[in-house]
């Protein structure tokens, strides 16, 4: 592979295109200050890969200790398990204990996301003492120093106070008198998606994490949540597209793993589509008697699939944002059933007009064109309405069973509606065209 020439300014943009050797070489060519800024911009998988490409432990130690404990824990989780002891040995005793405590939590829980370093003060301090304590801790707790968390002698969270509030308070005032006591906190085992919803709901820059006894364990900052939201959105989009979630960047995932992630769902969808062929085989007598009906099969089943995909995408996103709760399924059912009826009526009307116009100019649909148009129009109403209902209700069913609603992928819904759409279409056609074409 030819050498890639990289300038310092555009290194971040071309980083995914470089080999491990080229990345290390370009990174080492930067000044220390620029290298630190660049390193902090990298994702944790890229940081882990860069650390592994370094030759000396002294170099790894320098960059590993630059990070907050939660980021260090994330990096260690990204490297092979046999490398964990080697990286942990590079940390100080305090850092090592903090990181090991974080590694004990699930990666997507509050405990796995939190930074155990936060600024804490006592409620019985004077505000001037609080400011001095604030300044002293900010030197080593620089990740988030806009607020201090007020804890009692047992480290139980009792309040929160901002640096601005401390400066504005009159001298001689106790921290207890200016702190806010209605603090929003989360338990150690809360899922990261729910944490992101709370931070958005209450417009927080950070949220404290407490244990079952209310003792302060750490904070999850909005910087951590930005990554969580991006990760959750990526996983949902991939699942909605009809594949397993892929956590690695596109250019870094192994080809065999890519095939594995995509192939499983494609096989399931293919087997589902075989039911469509079975349904057409069941109606082969009707098809043989009225070949004109086959012209509208793609129109009918694609309309149902499209409406179902729309509905499932809409509901999954609303669930992810906390706009819809599980107990609201009946209200959603009624709303989507009415939506499906209206949308089906629109598409059905267009289908009828299309048939009448083509008949006027070409005569292709024969003497029973009006009945054919009626069958197609009514079928479109039924199929679109059915697709909308299925697409909107499937995420509720999956969540009720404990699965991720995003697993109700658009291709899966479309496949399901394809089969039932054929049954609706030929059922309606059989009733309307009985005694004429059928």
Image: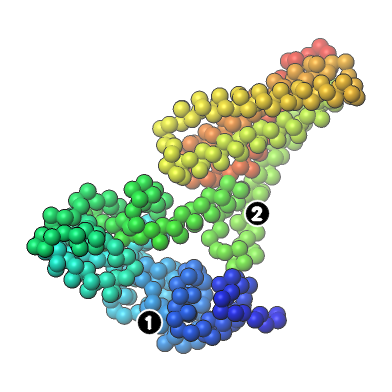
Q: What element does badge 2 sit on?
A: helix
At a point 65% along the width and 65% down the height, the residue shown is: 255
On the question of residue 331 being in view, the answer is yes
- Disc 2 residue crowd, few under 14, some 14–19, many 20+, Cα 10 Å: some
- Taking 259 as reference, is 114 left or right? left
Q: Which residue is mark 1?
A: 90
- Disc 1 residue crowd, few under 14, some 14–19, many 20+, Cα 10 Å: some
Image position, residue 421 (x, y; %): 68, 29
Image position, residue 238 (x, y; %): 58, 52
Of the pair 6 and 73, the residue shown nearer to us: 6
Question: Which of the labelled discs sits on residue 285, or is there none?
Answer: none
Which one is in front in this view, the residue at disc 2 or the one at disc 1? 1
On the question of residue 105 being in view, the answer is no
Image position, residue 77 (x, y; %): 44, 68
At a point 54% along the width and 29% down the height, the residue shown is: 336
Distance, label 2 to label 1, CA atoms, is 41 Å
At a point 32% along the width and 75% down the height, the residue shown is: 96
Q: What element does badge 1 sit on?
A: loop
- Residue 420 appears in which quarter of the rendering? top right
At a point 55% along the width and 26% down the height, the residue shown is: 337
- Residue 299 appears in which quarter of the rendering? top right
Of the pair 371 and 245, the residue shown nearer to us: 371
- Taking 377 as reference, is 165 left or right? left
Lower sequence index among marks 2 and 1: 1
Above or below: residue 125 compared with residue 81: above
Residue, far right: 362
Q: Which residue is mark 2?
A: 263
């Amino acid at each position: 592979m030819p050498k890639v020439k990289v300038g310092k300014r555009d290194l971040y943009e071309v980083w995914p295109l470089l080999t491990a050797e080229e990345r290390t070489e370009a990174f080492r060519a930067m000044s220390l200050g620029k290298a630190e800024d660049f390193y902090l911009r990298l994702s944790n998988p890229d940081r882990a890969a860069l650390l592994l490409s370094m030759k000396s432990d002294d170099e790894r130690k320098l960059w590993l200790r630059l990070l907050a404990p939660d980021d260090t824990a994330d990096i260690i989780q990204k490297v092979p398990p046999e490398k964990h002891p080697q990286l942990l040995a590079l940390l100080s005793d305090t850092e090592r204990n903090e990181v090991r405590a974080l590694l004990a939590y699930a990666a997507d829980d509050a405990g796995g996301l939190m930074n155990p370093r936060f600024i804490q003060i006592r409620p019985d301090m004077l505000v001037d003492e609080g400011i001095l304590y604030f300044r002293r801790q900010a030197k080593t707790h620089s990740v988030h120093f806009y607020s201090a968390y007020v804890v009692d002698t047992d480290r139980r969270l009792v309040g929160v106070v901002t640096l601005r509030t401390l400066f504005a308070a009159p001298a001689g005032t106790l921290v207890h008198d200016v702190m806010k006591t209605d603090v929003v906190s989360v338990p150690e085992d809360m899922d990261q998606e729910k944490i992101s919803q709370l931070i958005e709901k209450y417009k927080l820059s950070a949220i404290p994490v407490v244990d079952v006894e209310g003792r302060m364990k750490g904070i999850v900052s909005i910087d951590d949540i930005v990554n969580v939201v991006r990760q959750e959105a990526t996983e949902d989009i991939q699942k909605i597209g009809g594949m397993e979630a892929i956590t690695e960047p596109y250019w870094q995932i192994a080809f065999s793993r890519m095939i594995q992630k995509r192939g499983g769902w494609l096989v399931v969808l293919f087997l589902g589509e075989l039911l469509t062929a079975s349904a057409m085989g069941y109606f082969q007598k009707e098809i043989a008697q009225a070949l004109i009906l086959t012209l509208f099969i793609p129109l009918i089943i694609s309309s149902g699939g499209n409406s179902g995909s729309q509905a499932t995408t809409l509901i999954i996103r609303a669930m992810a944002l906390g706009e819809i709760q599980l107990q609201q399924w009946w209200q959603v059912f009624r709303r989507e059933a009415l939506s499906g009826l209206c949308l089906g009526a629109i598409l059905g009307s267009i289908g009828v007009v299309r048939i009448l116009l083509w008949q006027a100019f070409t005569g292709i649909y024969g003497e029973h064109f009006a009945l054919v148009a009626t069958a197609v129009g009514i079928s479109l109403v039924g199929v679109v309405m059915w697709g909308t209902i299925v697409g909107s209700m499937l995420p509720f069913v999956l969540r009720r069973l404990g699965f991720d609603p995003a697993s109700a992928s658009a291709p899966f819904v479309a496949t399901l509606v394809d089969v039932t759409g054929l049954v609706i279409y030929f059922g309606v056609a059989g009733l309307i065209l009985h005694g004429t074409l059928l």
